[in-house]
């Protein structure tokens, strides 16, 4: 899986992080997360699928102790360069399917939060997801949290957009239970889409604290070229999303959703 993302490391910030839609969606994630977890200097955070480290940088600047991990060594290198000035942020190459390696290797830290942003877990099959939650339990403190930003198996924006272009295979691609091969900068990456209720079922041993839509009004990032020259329109859409962060039912129809779970 690492090879799927190594080649995107150099351009990811330009293509998504610094893009108009990328900025809006990440801000929505942070605003939603703040309602169930506030990072402080007393927090220990494990980030999985850290990508280029934008979230690790955010948590690190708030004072939290952060271990940022990713299966892609190239992504980890970018994260290290971005956070090198923060002694409270460390980085490690780690396959999410081998999360138990942390606890089995004598790793003593127990975390207040395990965090994954923007669809990192959509690379996992159902069995992989069940194993992830099982392994995560031993890494969390009592009452520790998991916050995951996942792509649901239906996105209203995507369905309408591709249907109007008569590209029906793309309009309903998220509905395929067997997953799809998503094009990531020229690489085909196996991708699986899950509803909030499915994640709840997989997360045995956890209680759902909140589910938040991320991008019901704000469009998917592949529409950046259209909205790049329409900042006022995007701002209005983002404002609509901000006003509806507490509307859990919209999570099943958004580009992403954030689900926050607490260890029982």
Image (cartoon, grey):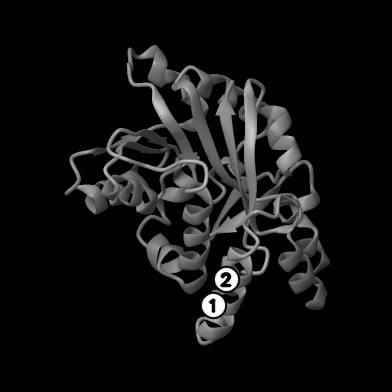
Residue 143 in the image: above or below residue 221:
above
Residue 19 appears in the picture as rendered: yes
Residue at x 39% of width, y 50% of height: 55
Residue toward you, 53 or 237 = 237
Asked which quadrant contains residue 133, the reply is: top right
**Considering the numbered disc 2 on the image, is that residue within a helix, a strand or a loop?**
helix
- Image position of 105 (left or right of 27): left
Image position, residue 189 (x, y; %): 59, 49
Image position, residue 24 (x, y; %): 50, 67
**Considering the numbered disc 1 on the image, is that residue within a helix, a strand or a loop?**
helix
Residue tagged 2? 238
Residue at x 65% of width, y 45% of height: 211
- Image position of 260 (left or right of 110): right
- Image position of 190 (left or right of 197): left
Image position, residue 34 (x, y; %): 47, 48
Residue tagged 1? 235
Distance from the alpha carbon under mark 1 to that under mark 2: 5 Å
Q: Residue 130, which numbered label?
A: none
The answer to whether the residue labelled 1 contacts the one labelled 2, judged by CB atoms less than 8 Å apart, is yes
Residue at x 56% of width, y 80% of height: 227
- Badge 1 crowding class, 10 Å Cα cut-off, few under 14, some 14 to 19, many 20 or more, is some
Image position, residue 155 (x, y; %): 73, 59
Residue 185 appears in the picture as rendered: no
Residue at x 68% of width, y 63% of height: 216
């Amino acid at each position: 899986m690492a090879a799927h993302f190594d080649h995107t490391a150099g351009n990811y910030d330009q293509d998504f992080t610094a893009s108009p839609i990328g900025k809006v969606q990440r801000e929505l994630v942070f605003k939603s997360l703040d309602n169930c977890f506030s990072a402080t200097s007393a927090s220990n955070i494990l980030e999985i699928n850290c990508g280029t480290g934008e979230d690790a940088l955010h948590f690190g600047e708030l004072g939290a102790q952060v271990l940022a991990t990713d299966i892609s060594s190239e992504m980890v290198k970018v994260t290290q360069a971005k956070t090198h000035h923060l002694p409270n942020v460390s980085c490690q190459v780690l396959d999410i399917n081998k999360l138990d390696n942390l606890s089995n290797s004598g790793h003593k830290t127990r975390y207040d939060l395990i965090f994954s942003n923007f669809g990192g877990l959509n690379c996992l099959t159902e069995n992989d997801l069940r194993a992830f939650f099982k392994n995560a339990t031993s890494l969390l403190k009592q009452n520790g949290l998991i916050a995951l930003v996942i792509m649901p198996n239906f996105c209203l924006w995507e369905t309408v957009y591709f249907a109007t272009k008569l590209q029906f295979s793309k309009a309903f691609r998220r509905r395929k239970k067997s997953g799809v091969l998503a094009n990531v900068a020229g690489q085909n990456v196996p991708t699986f889409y899950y509803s909030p209720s499915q994640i709840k079922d997989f997360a045995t041993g956890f209680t759902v604290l909140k589910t938040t839509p991320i991008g019901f009004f704000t469009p998917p990032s592949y529409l950046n070229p259209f909205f790049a020259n329409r900042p006022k329109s995007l701002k209005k859409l983002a404002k609509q999303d901000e006003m509806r962060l507490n509307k859990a039912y919209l999570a099943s129809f958004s580009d992403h959703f954030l689900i926050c779970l607490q260890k029982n």
